[in-house]
Image (spheres, rainbow, N blue to C red):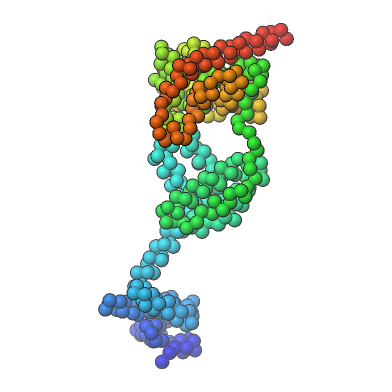
Amino acid sequence: MKLTDRTIKALRPKDHAYKKADGKGLTLLVNADGGKHWRFRYRFHGREKMLSLGSFPDVSLSLARQKRDEMRRVLALGLDPSVERKKERLRAAFASSDTFEQMASAYIAKRQAEGAAPRTLKKQKTFLGALRADIGAIPISALTSEQLLAALQKHETRGKRTLANEARAFASRVLQLAIAQGRASRNVADDLRGALIAPLPGGHAAITCPKELGRLLACIRAYEGETVTSLCLEILAHVFVRPSELREARWDEFDLEKGLWRIPAIRTKLRREHIVPLSPQVIRLLKELRRHTGNQAFIAASSVKPDQPISDMTFNKALRSLGFDRRHHVAHGFRRTASTLLNEQGYNRDWIERQLAHVERNKVRGAYNAAEYLDGRRRMMCEWSSYLGELLDEAQKAKRKQ
């Protein structure tokens, strides 16, 4: 006889547990303590098995029958309901533990294992930090485009458009990894392409007026802060490498006799060795710098922690103290300064691009020669240093006349 809500409520405990059948494998177990628990009994490959479907009244009679019918449909497909339930629980546990923050951390660890540059890893950690509070705890499989957009727009409304756009791209890469690992089915970050306000145009702030450049060089020469900082800034103006490449440079990378600096692939953006010809002026500056840090591994060794390079904010802090804020000129801007003025002076564009370590993508993937155009680049770099010297002299003379 099938059960009813009235008969179930009327069941009283006995000295021992007993069962009441509802049909099609569904039974109600009444324990001696009065607890009433639903059970589904079935046979799979000749073996009798049992599944718990919850307790009455939390699971009503109608809901227990629905669960029984679901289990019978699984059986009809030739599957074991007990095994399928375990799989579902594992999938649910897997999904709940795979939060955005955990997947993002896994992505960053992957990039580190692949040899990504420290500055790249630092930027990715910044993007994770920008998203952590809003979506860090959300399961990666449950993240929606609306949730991600709201997190990004918080930065956008604060005027941090570049951060918002780059954080979206970072989230897209994290989700792509999650999809590849079967932890997400959709890249909601890609749905947001074009949804954010584009960053303001323009690259790193840079002085491109020769007279202003001369004034900047004179200010750097007169800098009253750390000598290592002023020497490195002056060197940076001459060699126009990426600031991190100079800041993290080691003395064993330099051959002052041959006038060459070989930046190892591990420290370059494109993971290719980059050769920098050193002018006589730069060699003199390096020899002066060696008097201060020659006993350390890094040419820009920190005075506080000599076994480490100076902070990545040191150069720009020094420039700000000299009156050049981020809207006027930043350390990375020396690259744009050199590119603009060298092109205006008619130097071979291939020499300039190669010296900036700008390499066509097909060359990155294929044949690559670190010494490409080296003779021409050496002449250009020597003439560039002489040009900077002239600008510096003019600026210092103008200042003395004031």
Q: Residue at x 39, y 20 (%)?
A: 252
Task: Mark yes or no: residue 49 visible.
Answer: yes
Front residue of 302 and 400: 400
* Relative image position of residue 243 (x, y in whole percent): 52, 26
Q: Residue at x 49, y 47 (%)?
A: 173
* Relative image position of residue 87 (x, y in whole percent): 38, 65
Q: Residue at x 58, y 14 (%)?
A: 388
Total labels drawn: 0
Front residue of 306 and 175: 175
Relative to 26, does residue 280 appear above or below in the rendering?
above
Front residue of 377 and 94: 377
* Image quadrant occupied by the N terminus: bottom left
Residue positioned most to the right: 402
Relative to 308, does residue 128 appear above or below in the rendering?
below
Residue 233 falls in image quadrant: top right
Task: Mark yes or no: residue 299 visible.
Answer: no
* Relative image position of residue 82 (x, y in whole percent): 35, 72
Residue positioned most to the bottom: 1
* Relative image position of residue 72 (x, y in whole percent): 39, 79
Front residue of 136 and 12: 136
Q: Residue at x 63, y 43 (%)?
A: 198
* Image quadrant occupied by the C terminus: top right
